[in-house]
Image: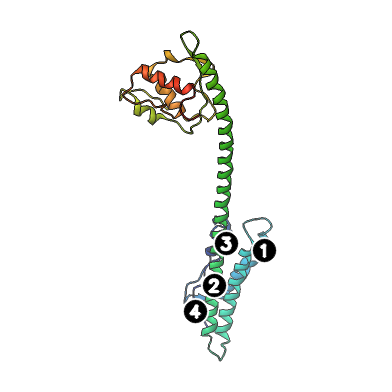
Amino acid sequence: MVEVHAPYAVPSIHSFHADLPDDLAVTLSLHASLEQNDRITPANVKDAEAAVVKLEAFRNEEPVITEAVVQTAKDRAHSLHTIVSQTKFPNPVDNTEILALLRRIDEGQRQVVEGQHKLEEGQHKLEEGQLKIRHDMDVGFRLVDIRQDNRRLTALNEGKIKDQPPLRFMMRKKVVIGEGQELARSIAVRESANIVAKGASDIGSVWKEGLVTIAELTTNEVLDIVRFYNEDFGIEKKDQPAARITKIITWLMGGGPL
């Protein structure tokens, strides 16, 4: 009896389609592979044919089993048939070119599958990019509305500067994304200042609703306002409390970017 050996490696179906779930690959025997010079038995050929039948049977139940997966199984079964028939019934002509062509076909199939995976990855990145653009546009439109609100608030605050002390102002809306805990720590006079992280608030929110008596703010409250808005209002570490209060009042009346 003529023994048939693989003239080249015959990879498994799963090696071409690594995205197939492993449990499904085990159930449908998609891990079977042959190395170069491995013996090809009738059972190997029968299993390859059975894999095609199983994949076609499960295709309607498993969306991951695409036409490309079924075609790979068919190509693999065909390759085993070709190797067996060429070995048992050798052609008098040199088969070297044919075998080389089969190897190129196998390599081409692998490259096609890899190309499909890269295309899917590219599509995913494109969708992510489109979502980011839409998000950034939404934020941009929101900031336009928020800055218009801040202009109205600063106009109200400018009118209140004529009031009798203690002066009370409306807080402007937040426009800088993120939490300024490190920014607040950088202008704290004492290294041990207790600046509690509370998480970044949404743009458009305010540190406190209603009128706020700014002159009565404590040192920690000033630092918390810096943390909340993620802005330093021009405050420097060397500034005394009165200077810090003055800079916040200036900001509330329209100083700095709206």
Numbered mark located on residue 106 in the image: 2
Please name the amino acid that badge 4 sits on: Pro
User: Residue 249, relative to residue 94: is it above or below?
Assistant: above
* Residue in the picture at 55% in, 57% down: 19
Q: Does the residue at mark 2 contact the one at mark 1 (Cβ under 8 Å)?
A: no
* Place of residue 74 in the rendered image (x, y in percent of width and height, measured from the top left): 62, 70
User: Residue 162, relative to residue 118: is it above or below?
Assistant: above
N-terminal of the pair, mark 2 or mark 4, is 4
* Residue in the picture at 58% in, 59% down: 27
How far apart are the alpha carbons under marks 2 and 1?
Answer: 21 Å
Disc 2 on helix, strand or loop? helix
* Place of residue 131 in the rendered image (x, y in percent of width and height, measured from the top left): 58, 45
Residue 239 appears in the rendering: yes
Disc 4 on helix, strand or loop? loop
How far apart are the alpha carbons under marks 3 and 4?
Answer: 28 Å
Numbered mark located on residue 131 in the image: none
How far apart are the alpha carbons under marks 3 and 1?
Answer: 21 Å
Q: In this orientation, which residue lies closer to the viewer: 164 or 17?
A: 164
Of the two numbered discs 2 and 3 in the rendering, the one whose residue sits closer to the viewer: 3
N-terminal of the pair, mark 3 or mark 1, is 1
Residue at the bottom extreme, as displayed: 92
Numbered mark located on residue 116 in the image: 3
Res 145 → quadrant: top right
